[in-house]
Amino acid sequence: MVWTLTMVVNIVFICAVIINFANCDDTPPPIWQTLSLFNPVENFISANTPAEESSDFEEFYDFIIIGAGSGGSVLANRLTENTNWTVLLLEAGTNENFISDIPLMAAFQASTQYNWGYKNEPQPGACLGSKDQRCNAIRGKALGGTSVVNFLIYTRGNPGDYDSWANLGNPGWSYNEILPYFIKSEDCSGCKNIDTDYHGFQGTLKIENPRLKSPLLKKFLRAGQELGYDITDPNGHQHIGFSEAQATMNRGRRCSAAKAFLGPEIRQRPNLQISTRTRVVKILFDDQKRTTGVEIIKNRQKFIIKTRREVILSAGAFNSPQLLMLSGIGPRPHLKTLGIPPIQDLKVGYNLQDHISFSHLLFLVNESITVSDTLVQNPRHVLNYLLNGDGPYSIPGGALGIGFLQSGFNHFGRDYPDLELVLGAGGLNGDTMGTLRRLLRLPEETYRKVYSPVVNIPGFSIATVMLRPKSIGRVMLKDKNPLHWPAIHGNYFYESEDLDVLIEGIKKAIKLVNSEAFKDVGARLHDIPLPACQHLAFASDNYWRCALRHLATSLGHPVGTCKMGPDTDPDAVVDFRLRVKGVTGLRVVDASIMPHIVAGHTNSVVMMIGEKAADLIKEDWTYY
């Protein structure tokens, strides 16, 4: 079916050229940017090449930001508001393009140059049914970072998350103190049924609901009410409940962090320089443990770039600890084993937490109310999307609605969820092009046995997400070559209670679909068992436990590997002002600083961290 994907891409590309399609800043993408998706990934030179000075860069910058993702994009915008400061933003990837902006094609981005391509190391109790028994660890490699490849869902977590951060010894991070930063960034003018006191309408990050009016969403919300839940704003005063999804979109098109914070007027600031296709391989220090600059690879050459004030690491929960350890900041025994001279002994790479999701619950129906690869090949839907921003292509990663629930294992508080249900407009049986199963690393044999028999029957999915895992992983170096992948040890289901929480979530999803709301379309659970679990009674706890160990995977929300905490916390890497402990002139501003993962999707949280960090930096340098 490769020809079908090519046909769709060709239609979309031709229309994109002739139609002025809306950006976050209402600027159409250039043709060369659309073509850039198909460029080969840049090959970098050996790490042993001597570094030199470059005429493409200034001799010094006040701030060097590593990573133009959700945190780095915000920082570059806010710090260059001070016209006396010069800022260099370094990004290993390149610009977005029109294809990456189509919300429904989020899963496709995992197969492009916009994904680093990381995979978890094999582990004994998880990802057993994935190809090579390794789950994908999706991370964005572009201006905009993971906000270019994620599924666009905008949730902030729970107020208790941030109050907990503050109670752990991080002043300034309570919910009441960080809420203004969420509000500052966003423009929720395209949102419906929201608690307006909790939202902003003047920011540059556009938020809206899915633009497809699907009867599935109405049934999902009504089913939630049947089970006793309220219809809520997931970012409002009440967290637990069901709602229509909110997504980082503008008129049906992805609004990434780069679009929101690095628009044309920002990029034209004379005190901001952005360098793409630039790989940072080391952070440099003097004898006093003062950060002096960075060593980079660009255009197959090595260069040294210097800073007057700070280097700010915004490379994400995998790349930030990797770069710190390569530079001598990390656990001393690990660094010495690899022959890296330790500069500061810190628990870098520990405390890895992630949301684990089970995306294999398929529900079949008797009516054509779902979305499939076959459906979206209809040129009518392509043209409708391009002309109006409507239709199935505007669904954020295929997600229509969400429900935040509590399991029986929840001990976090009355309005604190530990489970999320995500309503998908389609299911794996409609994935005839294979983009979703490639994302999930689902073997073709499994797909053929389980989903191919019902490929022509309309179906939808409900993904079950565990929001507060007990299992903790770690990021390590494989060696001291900066161009090699880090070793990502997710340790999923190391704590068996995580399995129990997800099993309860699966049961809640099935109960939801068995409600009166779905009866008129004959909704029923697809019951062909997974081959690896067919020896167990289908839908029993043991069956789901087997299915989870084989096919549950990361939702792409890794956090915690450069933990924020007070000096009394032996596991902390940065302080509450995000400064790396034991050295000067170095901060971390990304998901890795979270002490624990939030009960929600993490993209908006990283933008909030970027907003707050910018104010912290401005405060720290006010008198210099």
Image: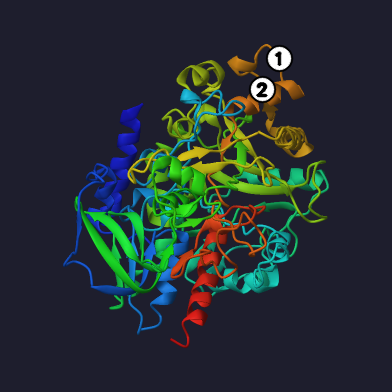
To which quarter of the image does residue 166 belong?
Answer: bottom right
Residue 23 seen? no
Residue 261 relative to residue 173: left or right:
left
Residue 509 relative to residue 5: left or right:
right
Dot 2 falls on a residue whose secondary structure is helix
Looking at the image, do the residues carrying marks 2 and 1 touch, with CB atoms under 8 Å apart? Answer: yes
Dot 1 falls on a residue whose secondary structure is loop
Disc 2: CA contacts within 10 A as few (<14), some (14-19) or many (>=20): many
Q: Using the image as rendered, state which of residue 523 and residue 398 is in the foreground.
A: 398
Give percent across and percent down for residue 113. Answer: 33, 44
Give percent across and percent down for residue 477. Answer: 44, 42
Residue farthest toward the bottom in the current orientation of the protein: 623
Query: What residue appears at the point 69 percent right and 47 percent down from the top-left corner?
Result: 468
Mark identifier at residue 546:
2
Query: What residue appears at the point 35 percent right and 34 percent down from the top-left corner?
Result: 5
Residue 115 relative to residue 234: left or right:
left
Image quarter of the C terminus = bottom left
Give percent across and percent down for residue 215. Answer: 63, 44
Numbered marks: total: 2
Disc 1: CA contacts within 10 A as few (<14), some (14-19) or many (>=20): some
Residue type marked 2: Cys
Query: What residue appears at the point 19 percent right and 64 percent down from the top-left corner?
Result: 53
Q: In this view, does 551 lie above or below 377?
A: above
Query: What residue appears at the point 57 percent right and 29 percent down from the top-left corner?
Result: 458
- Looking at the image, tell me whether mark 2 or mark 1 is earlier in sequence order: 1
Residue type marked 1: Leu
Q: Using the image as rendered, state which of residue 3 and residue 476 is in the foreground.
A: 476
Mark 1, residue position? 536
Give percent across and percent down for residue 574. Answer: 55, 62
Mark identifier at residue 318:
none
Residue 540 relative to residue 133: left or right:
right
Residue 186 seen? yes
